[in-house]
Image (cartoon, rainbow, N blue to C red):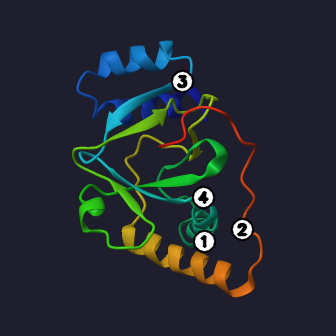
Amino acid sequence: MSGTGARSAVEWLVSVAPDPEACRWEWERNPLGVTLLPAGERWDVLIVAGRLGYPALDVLSRFMGRPGPVLADFGDARTGFFVPPGTASRWIGTGVRGAGAGTWIVVPYPGRATGGVRWLVPPDGSGLLTDPALLELALHEAAAALAGDGAAPHEPGPRHPGVDDL
């Protein structure tokens, strides 16, 4: 991610922080390179098991080219898709956890390596989010592929010790 892209992404992300300057300060000084941001204002996050999230991301990438921001926790146990605000409260689906209004999410600094939670698709600062209808289709296709052939899903990266939740 270029310096300009990372700055745009940072501005977009911190725009939801109660104190954007404190958020930037936390990102700069937190040894894990993460901060907590409230969901529900500019985006919600739908969180699925990494075993399903990685193949769903592959499907979305084929449909959209570039989906909205996507996070992975360490160990790649979970994948979080950034979707429009309000989606989490309306989503009905087994195995999908929503982070919406009234919840907070661990967010790494865009464009920097962190010790745990990381961007699979970093925000670009434009406000692009994943369309929930496309995400639902991608999750169905990924689940069907996993159930149908029993093949191993996309293999996640190396495991990292630390925080185990988005």
Q: Quadrant of residue 61?
A: bottom right
Kind of element beneath mark 4:
helix
Q: Residue at x 40, y 13 (%)?
A: 25
Q: CA distance from mark 2 to mark 4?
A: 9 Å
Residue 166: percent from left, percent from top: 47, 43
Q: CA distance from mark 3 to mark 2?
A: 29 Å
Callout 2, which amino acid? Answer: Pro
- Binning the other alpha carbons within 10 Å of mark 2 as few (below 14), some (14 to 19) or many (20 upward) gives some
Q: Which residue is mark 3?
A: 33
- Say whether residue 139 is left or right of residue 90: right
- Mark 1 or mark 3, whichever is nearer to me: 3
- Mark 1 or mark 4, whichever is nearer to me: 4
* Residue sitting at the far bottom: 148
- Mark 1 or mark 2, whichever is nearer to me: 2
Q: Quadrant of residue 39?
A: top left
Q: Earlier in the sequence, mark 3 or mark 4?
A: 3
Residue 149: percent from left, percent from top: 74, 84
Kind of element beneath mark 2:
loop
Callout 1, which amino acid? Answer: Val
- Binning the other alpha carbons within 10 Å of mark 1 as few (below 14), some (14 to 19) or many (20 upward) gives many
